[in-house]
Amino acid sequence: QVQLVESGGGLVQAGGSLRLSCVAAGSIFGVNAMGWYRQAPGKQRELVAHITSSGSTNYGDSVKGRFTISRDNAKNTADLQMNSLKPEDTAVYYCYANLQASRWVAADYWGQGTQVAVSS
């Protein structure tokens, strides 16, 4: 069984930092793109950061310059370092990955979500 396991959410004051981690676990042939999305109450899920298997990154406009995504291909992990947090960053953060179960089969997976709350 393949799953994404997230950790690192919590409560922090504005201006503070948090680091989220995501590990792809199970019978995995390969890991393609990974990323983080977030969803605040009453809002649509939005892209936070995305990283390809070769390390190319893409960020949502609201987090550029404050958040950094990284990955360790050997460990099948993707981390999100969040600095200068703002109250508007409060949301449930979801890890995403496109995982290969075999050389010919790939599918999208989502983590269960981790809450990030930023107080003013």
Image: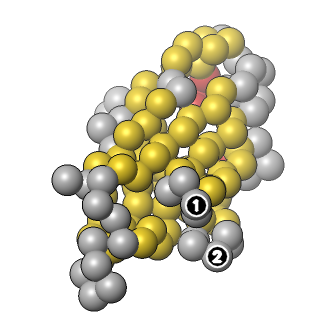
| Badge 2 amino acid | Ser
Q: Which mark is residue 93?
A: none
Q: Tags 1 and 2 in contact by the CB under 8 Å rule?
A: no
Please state which of residues 23 and 93 is positioned toward the viewer in this rendering.
Answer: 23
On screen, residue 55 versus residue 39, left or right, reads right
| Badge 1 amino acid | Ala
On screen, residue 101 versus residue 75, left or right, reads left
On screen, residue 31 versus residue 85, left or right, reads left
Q: SS class of the residue under badge 2?
A: loop
Q: Quadrant of residue 2?
A: bottom left
32 relative to 1, above or below: below
| Quarter that holds the C terminus | top right
Residue 92, position as x, y percentages in the image: 41, 32
Residue extending farthest to the left is 1
Q: SS class of the residue under badge 1?
A: loop
| Residue in the picture at 67% in, 54% down | 70
| Residue in the picture at 30% in, 38% down | 112
Residue 91 visible in the picture: no
Residue named by callout 1: 74
Looking at marks 1 and 2 on the same chain, the residue that comes earlier in the sequence is marked by: 2
Callout 2 crowding tier (Cα within 10 Å): few <14, some 14–19, many ≥20: few
Please state which of residues 105 and 47 is positioned toward the viewer in this rendering.
Answer: 105
| Residue in the picture at 60% in, 45% down | 79
Residue 119 visible in the picture: yes
37 relative to 51, above or below: above
Please state which of residues 89 and 51 is positioned toward the viewer in this rendering.
Answer: 51
On screen, residue 113 versus residue 104, left or right, reads right
| Residue in the picture at 48% in, 44% down | 22
77 relative to 11, above or below: below
Residue named by callout 2: 54
73 relative to 30, above or below: above
